[in-house]
Image: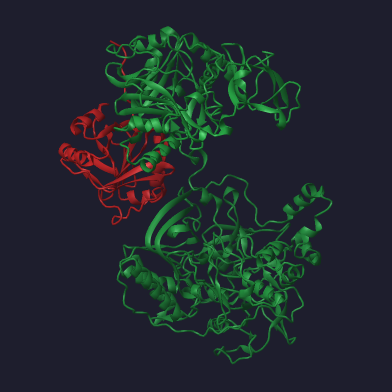
Chain colours: A green, B red
């Protein structure tokens, strides 16, 4: 099929030709075409089926407001549903398929729903599928889901990549029509940093679609000159194919740039970029959207918006039909007729609802006054229209204009409400704009070209003057104030057939009236009940006419009836763009321990702990499962020596004359008198007295401490300490800096720990129990002079040390410790063995410090000093926090030693019913103890410390388990602590 | 005498990538020492810094270059970094000795990894990950800022017309390199 609807002119490159397919049929177009303009050029009027009734639909608009012409673009994994043909740039090899039909587009089996339409009106689903209730999930919903919906997903992973970015400017100009161009020129010439963004691939907005002159040349030529000037300015950034979709706090705007959507392939580069634009000021020059008039069967392919018909003729050199009538309530519709006739297209009639003189002379066109269209003929393409007086006019295209709505959407993104202007019968931006935003041109209700240019200039001048730039002098290009008279006229009352308001959701005038009859008086309810204004077009062409009809029903004015609120995004933003680069392994950053490479080479299985990857266990050949590895690691450590990378624990360097006093306030237990060269366990409370974090802090010198935190709370504790230092006690000389990543730290635990370290720590340092006892710390050197820190602390309960070296030596240090430890059968151990040993020793960890427990619960109540000022000690003494029968942390073992304890089980006294009233506490941590050869657990139970030896039931309704357990000391291993002091 | 010795391996050592005439290089042997000004003795500390490095402690968000090439970056009212080339693991002692106890010092060398980004695409690449306005008028030579890039805390310093030093946590070095490299290839 040739391009039989191609006419002269337009901004297309006729010298080059693109081939593309629609539903497999090959067609041709030119660079500069959209898919829609190329389809129209090829006289393809039927392009899709409607959402609910599967009515044949065509191209309705020429822009992003398109409700009808949605296609599935591309193929395979690249297939994208619901792509608007009107904003899809044509490229060579483009593949598009129509969507939402079963069978072919021409013979859609689902079109039967249209004949059932009397039963399918607003609220049909709500009324019909209520009973029997059981049918909903199994029968109704699957059927509805199958028949509803628009395009199909490829169901494959998106092969494209996406990116995000940050932009900054003095002035963001949203929209590059006459208003936006004038604003950008004004601000750019004054030296302000300007970003000019527009969703279109050719900037210029309506100037490219009109024949109006600016400065003595065509509007399109003036736009081109303006763009040349702007492009030459270093301080101006032009962003075509970029939709500013949302206005957020602090002058931040969201923008989606479509980088490669107009190309056959993205070539490995990001397909789209989601920009976060931080602007000092903004000018919204988003223009206006034409609205239709509702009348019988106004949804046929060939019924289009008049301004869009003009766009196709003037910008794309395409006429949507050979016989084009115009139906209008305003002056602007007449320009479509005039422009078409100037291009040689036959316009048989201009049907104006007004009883007024001709706006302009349109040769060959009958002016039919005071009339409307009541019906149309032509199921798959318009054949004729029937007027209120009964006359039938054969046409293949009807250009409809119901007036223009300013695009106020972004002015509402921070709950701003538009206000009504009777003179243009439209909503304009209200006074409560997002801070920093000004609105100009058609978006502000300035509907004529000269007014738009003037507003663009004055708005930009006001904005940049506020930023300290000198405004430019008024030198507006000459342009006319074209006739824009408009009367409010929303639907043809004489029409008895269905008149469509929302083409995308198949909402008719009748549906709006019916929902009103059924009691839905609020616009928000109307929207939800009828689905008006939902889905991809968000009712850009439908909302205001529907609102007007709602107002008619209620007898109120349109402003009294109100509007629904606009929220971001203005047009659809793909999920892929919102995700950006964050997918797969790069979903979030990962942190590696210094000995990661060693661990990887030695069979470690890794576990994610926050962002860290930690060795969980080191499997050896012949081991059948993780338990084998973990049991071996525990036994080997307790028998001789084990080594574990504990770098992930938070490390905070605390210095200052008041460092000791500061620590004394942030820890619940005393730190003021900690001796130099000693380490102390510390417990931090929240302000409300609940346990917050624990760790050890070492005093390296009089004014220098090294604090450790749990891995999970490293950042939180640091932030909290900074808050305390800067805000609570700014008079203290104390300074904090994180050194977590700076030191590779290894736990060396087991009876041979000292013997092993003696081979590594330089001889000058005496490691004897006398010289370096339990809880000692100091600066040492290892391996002939490498600086290191040594702490004699134990999480495992064994004789143990932690040795730290600068992180760059971490991998080598692990290797050296293992080499030196060969004679002791040293074993590396992971987080699982670490966990088993701390449970065996009765040490609390994250499961116990869960944000609900107090020092009293943890059996550390006496640690909380009441003789000093510290965070949390006052509120920790509230009666409820220190009650005698509070739960206490104790140990548990199964009466039947062969059974495994289950964490999360709740304790119930023998003989009681297992319910919340009889709940005695819960099991927080469990492990299989290879040392004791049975399961051991830690848990909280009422009065636990006084119930040693009692048997209770551990019940887990979640697992459906129950077993008898004995309350025992939490210290399963070496309760006297002889090993760690050895 | 222990028979063992330790060989250092910094996370990004040796990184040197050029994409579209823009270079991403991990500077070798970079040492970082934090300096904290004691409360009530800030003037003495500032004087000690001036004496030690021959340049004044810059304003917050600025950095200054000492004659010996050390860069002093003022991070906050009472904190600064001294960044210099120093291969052995005793950078903190060197700085502490020069300041003669007038300020608190902490070795930060192994806490950070650094990448020097320079060339025609440097600023455009950073636009994809850096929330800070890097326009030459907004971020002058020597300016520095702490910010987040791809969820990673990052210190950025403008070291030349089209050159930036980026520093982030050493444990997440792989993600950090990936973020910048991806930006470079995405815009190339």
State the residue in front, A406 or A525: A525
Q: What is the quadrant of residue A105 in the picture?
A: bottom right
Q: Residue at x 27, y 18 (%)?
A: A785
* Residue B9 in view, yes or no: no
Q: Residue furthest toward the right?
A: A132
Position of A26 with respect to B1 (left or right) is right
Quadrant, the N terminus of chain A: bottom right
Q: What is the quadrant of residue A677 in the picture?
A: top left
* Spot occupied by residue A854 in the image (x, y as percentages of width and height): 54, 30
Looking at the image, residue A363 lies above or below residue A182: below
State the residue in front, A458 or A716: A716
Q: Residue furthest toward the top?
A: A823
* Spot occupied by residue A398 in the image (x, y as percentages of width and height): 64, 78
Position of A889 with respect to A915 (left or right) is left
Q: Residue furthest toward the bottom?
A: A357
Looking at the image, residue B81 lies above or below residue A459: above
* Spot occupied by residue A810 in the image (x, y as percentages of width and height): 37, 24
Position of A363 with respect to A900 (left or right) is left
Quadrant, the C terminus of chain A: top left
Q: What is the quadrant of residue A324 in the picture?
A: bottom right
Looking at the image, residue A231 lies above or below residue A458: above
* Spot occupied by residue A883 in the image (x, y as percentages of width and height): 59, 29
């Amino acid at each position: 099929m040739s391009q039989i609807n191609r006419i002269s002119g337009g901004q297309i490159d006729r010298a080059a030709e693109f081939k593309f397919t629609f539903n497999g049929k090959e067609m041709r177009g030119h660079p500069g075409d959209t898919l829609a303009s190329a389809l129209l050029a090829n006289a393809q009027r039927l392009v899709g089926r409607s959402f609910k009734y599967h009515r044949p639909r065509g191209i309705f608009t020429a822009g992003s407001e398109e409700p009808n012409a949605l296609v599935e673009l591309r193929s395979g994994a690249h297939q994208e549903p619901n792509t608007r043909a009107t904003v899809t740039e044509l490229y060579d090899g483009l593949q598009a398929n129509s969507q939402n039909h079963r069978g072919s587009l021409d013979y859609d089996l689902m079109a039967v729903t249209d004949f059932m339409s009397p039963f399918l009106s607003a609220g049909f689903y709500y009324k019909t599928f209520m009973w029997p209730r059981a049918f909903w999930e199994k029968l109704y919903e699957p059927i509805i889901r199958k028949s509803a919906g628009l395009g199909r997903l490829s169901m494959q992973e998106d092969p494209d990549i996406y990116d995000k970015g940050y932009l900054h400017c003095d002035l963001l100009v949203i929209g590059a029509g006459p208003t936006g161009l004038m604003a950008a020129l004004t601000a750019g010439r004054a030296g302000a940093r300007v970003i000019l963004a527009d969703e279109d691939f050719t900037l210029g907005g309506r100037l490219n679609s009109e024949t109006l002159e600016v400065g003595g040349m065509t509007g399109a030529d003036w736009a081109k000159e303006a763009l040349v000037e702007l492009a030459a300015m270093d301080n101006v950034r032009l962003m075509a194919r970029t939709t500013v979709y949302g206005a957020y706090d602090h002058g931040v705007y969201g923008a989606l740039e479509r980088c490669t959507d107009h190309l056959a392939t993205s070539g490995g580069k990001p397909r789209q970029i989601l920009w976060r634009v931080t602007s000092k000021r903004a000018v919204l020059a988003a223009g206006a959207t034409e609205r239709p008039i509702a009348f019988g069967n106004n949804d046929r392919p060939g019924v289009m918006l008049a301004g869009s018909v003009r766009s196709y003729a003037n910008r794309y050199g395409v006429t949507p039909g050979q016989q084009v009538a115009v139906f209008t309530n305003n002056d602007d519709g007449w320009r479509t007729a005039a422009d078409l006739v100037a291009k040689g297209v036959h316009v048989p009639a201009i049907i104006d609802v007004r009883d007024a003189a001709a706006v302009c002379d349109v040769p060959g066109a009958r002016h039919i006054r005071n009339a409307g269209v009541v019906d149309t003929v032509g199921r798959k393409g318009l054949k004729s229209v029937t007027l209120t007086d009964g006359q039938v006019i054969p046409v293949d295209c009807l250009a409809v204009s119901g007036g223009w709505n300013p695009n106020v959407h972004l002015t509402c993104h921070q709950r701003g409400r538009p206000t009504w202007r009777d003179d243009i019968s439209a909503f304009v931006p209200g006074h409560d704009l997002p801070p920093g935003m000004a609105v100009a041109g058609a978006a502000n209700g300035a509907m004529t070209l000269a007014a738009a240019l003037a507003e663009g200039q004055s708005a930009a001048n006001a904005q940049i003057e506020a930023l300290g730039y000198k405004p430019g002098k008024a030198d507006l290009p000459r342009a006319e104030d074209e006739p824009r008279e408009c009367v409010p006229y929303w639907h043809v009352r004489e029409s008895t057939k269905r008149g469509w308001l929302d083409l995308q959701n198949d909402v008719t005038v009748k549906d709006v009236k019916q929902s009103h009859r059924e009691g839905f008086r609020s616009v928000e309810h109307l929207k939800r009940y009828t689905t008006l204004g939902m889905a991809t077009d968000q009712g850009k062409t439908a909302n205001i006419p529907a609102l007007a009809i709602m107002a008619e029903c209620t007898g109120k004015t349109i402003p009294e009836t109100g509007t629904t609120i606009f929220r971001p995004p203005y047009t659809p933003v793909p999920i892929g763009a919102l995700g950006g680069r964050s997918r797969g392994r790069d979903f979030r950053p990962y942190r590696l321990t210094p000995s990661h490479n060693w661990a990887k080479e030695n069979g470690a299985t890794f576990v994610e702990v926050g962002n860290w990857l930690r060795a969980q266990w080191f499997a050896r050949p012949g081991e059948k499962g993780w338990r084998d590895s973990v049991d071996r690691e525990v036994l080997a450590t307790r028998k001789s020596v084990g080594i574990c990378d504990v770098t992930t624990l938070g490390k905070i360097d605390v210095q200052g004359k008041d460092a000791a006093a500061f620590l004394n306030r942030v820890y619940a237990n005393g730190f003021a008198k900690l001796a130099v060269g000693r380490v102390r366990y510390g417990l931090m409370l929240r302000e409300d007295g609940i346990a917050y974090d624990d760790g050890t802090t070492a005093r390296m010198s009089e004014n220098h401490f090294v604090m450790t935190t749990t891995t999970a709370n490293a950042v939180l504790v640091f932030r909290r300490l900074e808050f305390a230092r800067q805000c609570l006690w700014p008079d203290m000389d104390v300074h904090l800096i994180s050194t977590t990543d700076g030191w590779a730290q290894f736990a060396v635990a087991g009876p041979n720990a000292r013997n092993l370290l003696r081979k590594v720590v330089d001889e000058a340092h005496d490691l004897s129990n006398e010289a370096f006892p339990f809880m000692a710390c100091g600066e040492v050197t290892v391996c002939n002079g490498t600086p290191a820190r040594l702490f004699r602390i134990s999480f495992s309960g064994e004789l143990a040390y932690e040795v730290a070296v600068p992180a760059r030596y971490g991998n080598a240090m692990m290797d050296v410790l293992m080499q030196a430890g060969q004679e002791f059968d040293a074993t590396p151990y992971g987080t699982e063995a670490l966990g088993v040993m701390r449970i065996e020793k009765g040490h609390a960890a994250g499961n116990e410090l869960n944000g609900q427990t107090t020092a009293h619960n943890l059996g550390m109540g006496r640690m909380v000093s009441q003789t000093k000022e510290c965070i949390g000690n006052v509120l920790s003494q509230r009666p409820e926090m220190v009650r005698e029968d509070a739960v206490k942390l104790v140990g548990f073992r199964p009466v039947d030693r062969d059974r495994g304890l289950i964490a999360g089980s709740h304790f119930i006294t023998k003989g009681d019913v297992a319910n919340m009233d009889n709940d005695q506490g819960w099991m927080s941590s469990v492990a299989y103890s290879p040392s004791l050869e049975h399961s051991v657990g830690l848990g909280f139970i009422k009065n636990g410390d006084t119930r040693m030896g009692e048997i209770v039931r551990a019940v887990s309704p979640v697992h459906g388990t129950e077993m008898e357990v004995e309350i025992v000391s939490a210290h399963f291993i070496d309760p006297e602590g002889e090993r760690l002091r050895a | 005498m222990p028979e063992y010795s330790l060989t250092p391996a910094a996370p990004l050592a040796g990184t040197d990538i050029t994409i579209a005439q823009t270079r991403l290089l991990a500077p070798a042997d970079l040492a970082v020492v934090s300096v904290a000004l004691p409360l009530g003795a800030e003037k003495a500390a500032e004087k000690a810094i001036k004496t030690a490095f021959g340049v004044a402690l810059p304003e917050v968000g600025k950095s200054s270059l000492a004659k010996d090439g050390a860069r002093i970056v003022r991070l906050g009212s009472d904190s600064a970094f001294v960044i210099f080339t120093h291969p052995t693991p005793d950078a903190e002692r060197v700085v502490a000795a020069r300041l003669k106890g007038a300020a608190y010092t902490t070795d930060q060398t192994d806490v950070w990894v650094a990448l020097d980004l320079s060339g025609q695409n440097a600023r455009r690449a950073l636009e994809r990950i850096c929330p800070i306005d890097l326009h030459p008028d907004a971020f002058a030579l020597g300016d520095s800022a702490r910010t987040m890039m791809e969820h990673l805390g990052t210190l950025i310093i403008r070291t030349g017309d089209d050159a930036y030093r980026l520093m982030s946590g050493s444990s997440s070095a792989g993600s950090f390199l990936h973020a910048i490299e991806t930006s470079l290839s995405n815009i190339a």
